[in-house]
Image: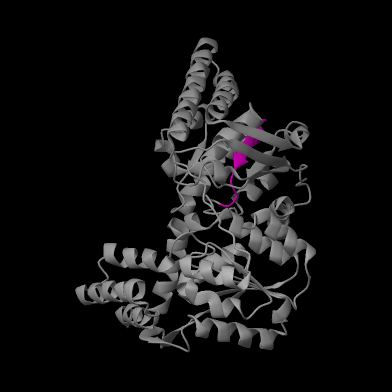
Amino acid sequence: MADIDDLLAAVASGPQGPEVGAFFDFDGTLIHGYSAALYFRERITSGAMSPQELLGTLVEVFNMQQRGHDVTRLVGVALGGLRGTELKDLEEMGQQLFRSKISGQLYPDARRLVQAHLRAGHTVALASSATRFQAQAAAEDLGIENLLVTEVEVLDGLLTGQVDGPILWGPGKAAAVEAFAEEQGVDLSESYAYGNGGEDVLYLETVGRPRPLNPDSILTQAAAERGWPVHRLHRQRRLTPTNVVRSTASFAGLGVGVAAGLGMGILNRDRGTALTVAAAIGSELALAGAGVELEVEGQENLWGSRPAVFVFNHQSQLDVVVLAALLRRDFTGVAKKELSKDPTFAAMGWLANVAYVDRTDSAAAREALAPALDSLRSGTSLVIAPEGTRSPTPRVLPFKKGAFHLAMQAQVPMIPIVIRNAGERMPAHSMILTPGTVQVRVLPPVPTDDWTAENLDEQVALVEKSFVDTLGDWD
């Protein structure tokens, strides 16, 4: 069984360029589990699925699992239940389900593998029997531009309940890959294909470098007969007794640090002292309890140009602890209003005099930022996530302008703090931490002297690109 590092090395040392294809199955290959099950659950819980559709779906799932039927009739039942649905509503549901569910199912090593093919200049495509609204958000997040999927028929913006073309299952997927390769000038004999199911044998046979990933029993046997190397990707086990104990110790350590800071602040009648003590002690105890170490490059950039607007990519609640450990003193922040009631954030937020912003009210948000601007002008640095919310994956979300306006108006530099793999240590919406290293790069200060309202969009794009490029270098 091949190791992921062997696969990555083989891609790096193999043929390069766009004439080499890399085709990825979706369900069970790039993600753990099946996206259709998540849509099925969403339709049940929302009350959108009729009893007839529910019964028909269960019957066809049984026929596939126990009688070896292909996916055709199951797709027919599913699309029939969507007849009359507006396409835009389905696309919105696809984006929402990716953020809330599917993003957490992506294998981290699958992301590394896709990136390896992109760096090699290969023509990368997702090839799946899933529909476009199931797979597109994941493909965009992974940087895959080409989608070979089962298309749905749309008339006047509404789904007709029928497919538009072949269902890409078994022979259909193999034929789609061959047609795509001919159209794009891809040499299949030099190309790669990744799949996990017995139905993928024909598809894998279209290329010269078939690579079964997480194969089921049928594909495992077929791979052994054909001499194909196989690999199983693994998700990190998080809910273990050790991780629960460490997470509890981490939160307790943070609480001790905040309590110590409050005590010192009361004694000295100085909120700045309270923040310095809480940030230093609380972050150290929290990280030690979790078994998380920081590996920081560019630490000198944290101190030479204060006050400044520190911007960071946001994927995890752990980011707050990381930033406290880095910045230590003389900083405040901007956060969404909901965090004012978050027990893991509110105390530190009070000590740092954080400005809470209602993202649903633009006028109120601008008013809430006024104290942050005053703090900057009086010598206190500001830390803010320009994405505006946590990204569900390591991919950087589009930057908003608020932090850039503040830096420009206060005439202070902007300092990017690029955080890698905090989400692996503590995923979004999780309270469980896993031990390991969080890597941080503090980039050189970005002067704002020549920023104007006219060129601000360009400045936002440049700083956002510095995050994307830095994370790409790490990969």
Q: Observer-nearest residue: 248 or 446?
A: 248
Image coloring type: one colour
Residue drawn where x is 38% and y is 63% of the image:
38
In magenta, the rendered stretch is 376-387
Q: Observer-nearest residue: 59 or 224?
A: 224
Q: Observer-nearest residue: 440 or 196?
A: 196
Q: Position of residue 268 (x, y in %)?
A: 55, 11
Q: Position of residue 451 (x, y in %)?
A: 74, 52
Above or below: residue 369 compared with residue 40: above
Q: Observer-nearest residue: 186 or 352?
A: 186
Above or below: residue 143 compared with residue 204: above
464 drawn magenta: no
Tell which residue pokes out farthest to the top in this image: 267
Q: Position of residue 415 (x, y in %)?
A: 71, 42
Please state if 82 lies on the left or on the right of 404 as rendered. Answer: left
Tell which residue pokes out farthest to the left in this image: 51
Please state if 298 lies on the left or on the right of 363 as rendered. Answer: right
Tell which residue pokes out farthest to the front in this image: 225
Above or below: residue 186 compared with residue 116: below
| Rendering quarter of residue 86 | bottom left
Residue drawn where x is 47% and y is 34% of the image:
243
385 drawn magenta: yes
Labels in figure, total? 0
Above or below: residue 270 compared with residue 200: above
| Rendering quarter of residue 326 | top right
Please state if 50 lies on the left or on the right of 316 as rendered. Answer: left
Does the rendering let one see residue 371?
A: no
Q: Position of residue 66 (x, y in %)?
A: 32, 72
Which image quarter holds the N terminus? Answer: bottom right
Residue drawn where x is 65% and y is 31% of the image:
327
Residue drawn where x is 69% and y is 36% of the image:
295
Does the rendering let one see residue 152?
A: yes
